[in-house]
Amino acid sequence: MIGTLPMAALAPLDYRYALDGARTLFEPHATPLIRCHAPELAAEVAQRFPAPPPADASAGALWIEPLVPSWGAELADLARQLPVGARLVVLVSQPLARMLPERRAWSGQPLGMRLLGLRDLRHALRKGDLVIETTYGIHSAASIALSQVSQQAARLSRPDLADRLHFAARLRYHTQGPLSALATVALLVARKEQGARKQRNKGTRERVS
C-alpha cells in the first residue's frame, strides 16, 4: 500500500509521480507484466502493483529503466508477448535526471540517459507493431527553473514572489508531447496494433509515389 515505506526508503519524487501515472494507464485492478531494472524502485513498484504479474501479459506491460546492453532483445521479447490491443508503458530516466543526487548512485546503464536513447527506443517501438500514443514528462525543465528562481526569491526576502513562483513550478511539473524530452523522467505510452508496421510502410510508399 502506498504510504507504508519509511521516508528514508522513498524513491525521488520524480519517480514516485511517474509510477503513480503509470498505475493509472492500466486497468484499476490489473497487474501488467513488469520488467524493472532499477532495484531502487522495486519497493515503490510493489506498493502500486501488489499482485503477481500475469505470465501472458494480457493486462499490458510496464518496462522500467531499459538498459543499454539488453534493451533491444528485451523489447523484441515484450512485443512478442503482448497481445494486440495491449499497452506497453516505458518509464525512463532522461539526461536531466543526472541533476538528482539520489539518481547518481544508481547502478546500470539506462538507455534514456543517453542523448539519443529515447529516439532509438521510439524507432524500435515503431518497428515492432507498437504505436506510440503519447509521451509524458515528469519534473519538467520549466518546473526546475521556476523552483530555483523561487528559492532565490526566498533568500532575497521576497516570500510573496517565492510563493507565486513555487506555485507556477508545481503547475508545470508535468508536461506532454515534444517538451517531455526536457524532463527528468519520461513515460512513453505505446499500444500493440496488428499490422501497424505494414500500414506505416504502405503510407510511406504512397507518399513517395
Image (tube, helix red, strand yellow):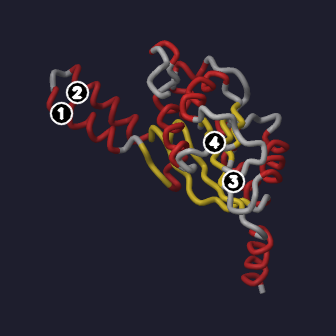
Gap between marks 4 and 2, in whole Å?
45 Å
Question: How many C-alpha atoms fall within 10 Å of the one at disc 2: few (<14), some, or many (≥20)?
Answer: some
Q: Secondary structure at mark 4?
A: loop
Gap between marks 4 and 3, in whole Å?
24 Å
**Mark 1 highlights which residue?**
161
Question: How many C-alpha atoms fall within 10 Å of the one at disc 3: few (<14), some, or many (≥20)?
Answer: some
Q: Label 2 near label 1: C-beta < 8 Å?
A: yes
Amino acid under label 2? Ala
Among numbered discs 1 and 4, the one appearing first in the sequence: 4
Among numbered discs 4 and 3, the one appearing first in the sequence: 4
**Mark 3 highlights which residue?**
122
Toward the viewer: 61 or 30?
A: 30
Residue mark closest to the camera, 1 vs 3? 3
What label does residue 65 carry, if any?
Answer: none
Residue mark closest to the camera, 3 vs 2? 3
**Mark 2 highlights which residue?**
153
**Mark 4 highlights which residue?**
31
Question: How many C-alpha atoms fall within 10 Å of the one at disc 4: few (<14), some, or many (≥20)?
Answer: many
